[in-house]
Image: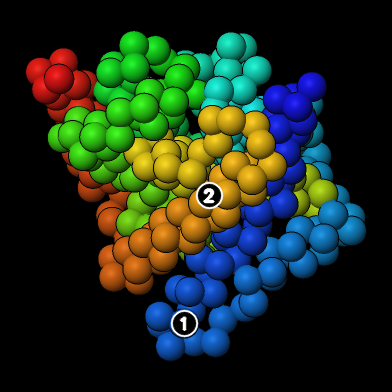
Amino acid sequence: MIPYLLEALQCLLTLSLAPGLIGLVRLLKARLQGRRGPPAWQPYRDLAKLLDKERVVSTQASWIFHATPHLVFASTLVVSLLVPLVAAPLPFDRAGDLIVVVYLLLLGTFFLALAGLDTASPFGGMGASREMTIAALAEPTIALAIFGMGAGAGSTNLGEIVARTLAHPEATLSPGHLMAFAALFIVMLAECGRLPVDNPATHLELTMIHEAMILEYSGPSLALLEWAAHMKFFLFLSLLSNLVCPWGVAVELSPRSLALAVLALAGKLVVLAVAVTVLETRLAKLRLFRVPELLGVSFILALLAITSSFLVR
């Protein structure tokens, strides 16, 4: 019974902490730019305001437009059951592994691109085209990078990879792990719409990617999509921290271990949030046609990580 309660705890952590993580990044970014910035809890206010607003729907919209926010939100929330956040292994690890996680994330991206095309908006179609171009390069890189980490564990199960890394901590300093971390970090920037791939703080039609696809949404539907984007960022940073540096993840289900796991997760997320903030402050947005070059570098790093996992034992 306790393991299933931990699965529910992971869902609650993802739902409750994801907006706060985005708020922390925005606050730190504003301070580094010499601005006061919004408080860290501002995303919670924004979500509450959107949930209370009226929804306006285009007359061209079909069932795809209406169903997409719920599908994107649900698929992202299911991923939180499969990613080891505070403990490993957990019961649902047997139901899904790396392949399931990658395709659940791709499912949300696919329907979001369809919704961008569904309303006959030129900006939605432009954003959908750009998003699928990025996804075609990013999703294989995610799989290859985690395959590289899982080669030593002999499994594609994320919980098994974490448990194996905890049993052999020297593996975290191997070339394969470091290259896989770099590949995942670059892909995280692309998948979550962060600089230098996309600028989440702008609505300039000629440059936006993610925002172009959700331009026609409003009210509760927009709240679900924004919340799902916050959770996706949270889960990617959790993957980066717990797969590459799994210390703190509970392997025994005691209250003390679980409390330490939650604190360790929060600390690692803050460190990665600071790293993302500094990177976004120092880098400008890439031109659209330069983005495949950046993602190509991440793909090569992921391939080298797999090669290294077989050559370096």
> Which residue occupies 34% across, 11% down?
154
Disc 1 crowd, CA 10 A, few/some/many (<14, 14-19, 20+):
few
In the displayed structure, 69 sits above or below 157; it is below
For the residues labelled 2 and 1, the Cα–Cα distance comes to 24 Å
Instruction: Look at 39% across and 32% down and name the residue there.
Output: 166
Q: Tell me: 78 left or right of 8.
A: left
Q: Nearer the viewer, residue 186 or 170?
A: 170
Disc number lying in front (2 or 1):
2
Quadrant (top left/top right/bottom left/bottom right) for the C terminus: top left
Give x and y (percent) for residue 44. Answer: 74, 62
Determine the residue located farthest toward the left in the rendered image. 311
Q: Position of residue 29 (x, y in %)?
A: 45, 73
Q: Position of residue 19 (x, y in %)?
A: 65, 57
Residue nearest the viewer, comparing 273 with 171: 171
Measured as percent of width and height from the top left, residue 47 is found at: 76, 58
Question: Helix or strand or loop: what does disc 2 sit on?
Answer: helix
Q: Is residue 185 visible?
A: yes
Q: Residue at x 46, y 54 (%)?
A: 268
Query: Is residue 269 something one can see in this rendering?
Result: no
User: Residue placed at 69% from the left, 69% from the top?
Assistant: 41
- Name which quarter of the figure residue 272 lies in: bottom left
Callout 1, which amino acid?
Arg
Q: In this view of the protein, which residue sits in the foreground, 218 or 31?
A: 31
Amino acid type at circle 2 is Leu
- 10 Å neighbourhood of mark 2: few (<14), some, or many (≥20)? many
Position of 10 relative to 211 (above/below) = above
**Residue 31, numbered label:** 1
Q: Which residue is mark 2?
A: 265
Q: What is the total number of numbered labels drawn onto the structure image?
A: 2
Q: Relative to 312, is 224 on the left or the right? A: right
Label whose residue precedes the other's in the sequence (2 or 1): 1
